[in-house]
Amino acid sequence: MSLRSLDRMRRTADEAAGQGLVAIVVAPSPDLVYLTGYDPPPLERPTFLIVRPDRDPVMVVPRLERSLAAASAAGERIELVGWEDGVDPYALAAGLLPPAGRVAAGDRMWATHVLGLQRAAPGLDLEPAGPIVGRIRAIKDEDELAALRRAARAADEAFRRIADEPFLGRREAEVAADLAELLIAHGHARADFTIVASGPNAASPHHQPGDRRIQAKDAVVLDFGGELGGYHSDTTRTLVVGEPPLGFERVYQLVQEAQQAACDAVRPGARAHDVDRAARQPIVDAGYGDAFFHRTGHGIGLEVHEPPWIAAGNQQALETGMTFSVEPGVYLEDKFGVRIEDIVAVTDDGVEHLNRSPRGLLVVD
């Protein structure tokens, strides 16, 4: 097993002990990739990584996948317990757990597998593992930060290229397809999402691009990202086709100011709530509070959405190495919408913008 995986599992075990847990059980998911480097698909045959404070970790795997697990980074030193049809894998896993106590189950574990564990180990109290594993995953090491920088720069280059193309008269879906191709052309293994929302559609934050043709005076929200080297990109820019619609420039300036205020609030020790409030306050003061109806940001790494959540009420303190989006927006129904999004990293003395594409108002043809 790599030293990195070993260290991550030790920290997870220590955190479990500190929280009074007897074990953490993780199924195939980004959590399993993070902890072991092993990335099997989630299937009806359960795979369980069991991390225990007082014993070495062990992984229960279907026998037909045991060789794959053994060939991964996780297979170098971790104990692998195989099972095959005719054996109850839940009873097998239960036998590797204490008879009673609190056990945290991975957030991505299928309900079928959670219920199977509950049936096999009725003395255990199951709860979500997200508050523990998510907090550990939220702080990126230098290699992870470098991977996120590469993904962000590749997305920036895709935006630069798409902004040089004509928008007038094209269907949203056509632009979205070109944007996906550009992400892949600039290094992404895949494009996970390409939101292209024009005119009144831009007032819907998660609009699915369709057959609407982009018109003159349309605002166009581009929100896109994908996976590069196991880590993700996610950025949003809002363009305008020709002359801006009435009131658009003021709203754009407001969102730009809100995004900058939120980024300025990022520093070690600040709370996630503080960053959300910094973004929200200028929008509220300008009378558009009801038009900004989503959180300011989300963590990013092995998943597009992961802790920390930059949202009202989240008192989690920011720490050096955390990475997340900052994406305030204003959405005026039947008119237009504006959103600006960067991925940022918390540094020892403030914030690093991983996205570098221009945030000023860009007029396109």
Image (cartoon, rainbow, N blue to C red):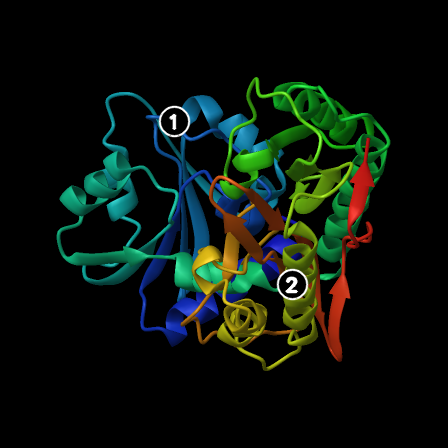
Residue at disc 2, secondary structure: helix
Give the camera-side residue of 304 and 120: 304
**Mark 1, mark 2: which one is toward the viewer?**
2
Q: Say whether residue 322 is left or right of residue 179.
A: left
Q: Which residue shows up at 67% across the image and 46% down it?
A: 236
* Label 1 – label 2 distance at C-alpha: 47 Å
Give the label on residue 254, or none: 2
Q: Which residue carries the number 1 mark?
A: 43
Q: In this view, does 341 lie above or below 199?
A: below
Q: Which residue shows up at 14% across the image and 43% down it?
A: 119
- Which quadrant holds residue 257? bottom right
Q: Which residue shows up at 57% across the image and 43% down it?
A: 336
Q: Say whether residue 185 is left or right of residue 301.
A: right
Residue at disc 1, secondary structure: loop
On the image, the x and y values in percent for residue 292 come to 49, 58
Q: Is residue 284 above or below residue 36?
A: below
- Which quadrant holds residue 124? bottom left
